[in-house]
Image: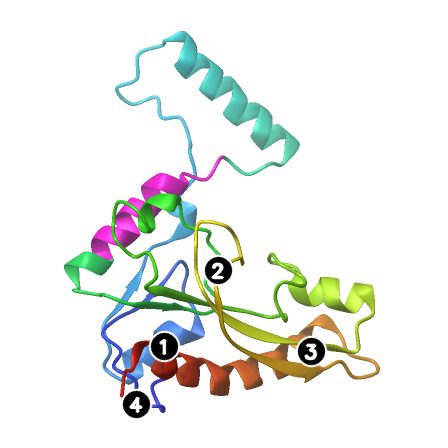
Amino acid sequence: MIKDRLPISLVLADRECRGIEIAKQAKIPTVVIQRRDFRQRPSLRDEKFTIAFVQCLIGYWIARFLGKPPKFQREKFTKVLAECLLEYGITHLAMAGFMTILSESIFTKYGFAGRILNSHPSLLPAFKGETAVQDALAFGVKVTGTTIHIATPKLDDGPIIAQEPVRVEEGDTVDTLWERIKVVERVLYPKAIRSLWGFQ
């Protein structure tokens, strides 16, 4: 999007990634809000040993023993992210490769309803969710693609702004197909942003 000369005020990610490095090279402000920092882990510091705390502590160690990750604090993550966006004066959001599902408050409490675009590696409404490319291959479709849509509280379900098909080639793997989808998405996304929001 940088080479398309769209007005980018901030690049924010939930982990270190290539997009952050590209933004830094282009002198665009960057923020990383690590998703892993929002895993609920009981702390012995300043805790009273209430029944609820003991249940939390037991649940945590059972989860660790079974190899399950601690519960993600989605609302807390969303709050920190939204406050960061507001601090930078961000009014519109274009999400790409951002795999953390935000809580409904981003649309209601923080006022981003209708102002968040999302890219998805399928021709929605087919193959929603994070395994869209795998699912398309498993189903055996001959054509999949990319969709740019307005994000809503319901996952991959907002109004569609633009779509572009991508042919599934013989011998495709998840990686090869996804790379071709990304190539198409990089062209389609800036066009969708301009057509919807009128940014020049």
Q: Secondary structure at mark 3?
A: helix
Query: In this figure, which residue is indicated by the disc labeled 4?
Result: 5
Q: Residue at x 48, y 87 (%)?
A: 187
- Do the residues bearing badges 3 and 4 touch, measured as CB atoms within 8 Å? no
Q: Earlier in the sequence, mark 2 or mark 1?
A: 2
Q: Earlier in the sequence, mark 4 or mark 2?
A: 4
Q: Residue at x 62, y 29 (%)?
A: 65
Query: In this figure, which residue is indicated by the disc labeled 2?
Result: 158
> Identity of the amino acid at label 4?
Arg
- Relative image position of residue 7 (x, y in whole percent): 25, 81
- Mark 3 surroundings: few (<14), some (14-19) or many (≥20) residues within 10 A: many
- Relative image position of residue 154 (x, y in whole percent): 50, 50
Q: Residue at x 30, y 12 (%)?
A: 48
- Mark 2 surroundings: few (<14), some (14-19) or many (≥20) residues within 10 A: some
Q: Earlier in the sequence, mark 3 or mark 4?
A: 4
> Identity of the amino acid at label 1?
Leu
**Residue 72 magenta-highlighted:** yes
- Do the residues bearing badges 3 and 2 touch, measured as CB atoms within 8 Å? no
Q: Secondary structure at mark 2?
A: loop
Query: In this figure, which residue is indicated by the disc labeled 3?
Result: 177
Q: Earlier in the sequence, mark 1 or mark 4?
A: 4
> Identity of the amino acid at label 3?
Leu
Query: In this figure, which residue is indicated by the disc labeled 1?
Result: 196
Q: What secondary structure prevails in the magenta region? A: helix
Q: Tell me which colouring the rendered structure shows.
A: rainbow
Magenta region, residue range: 71-84
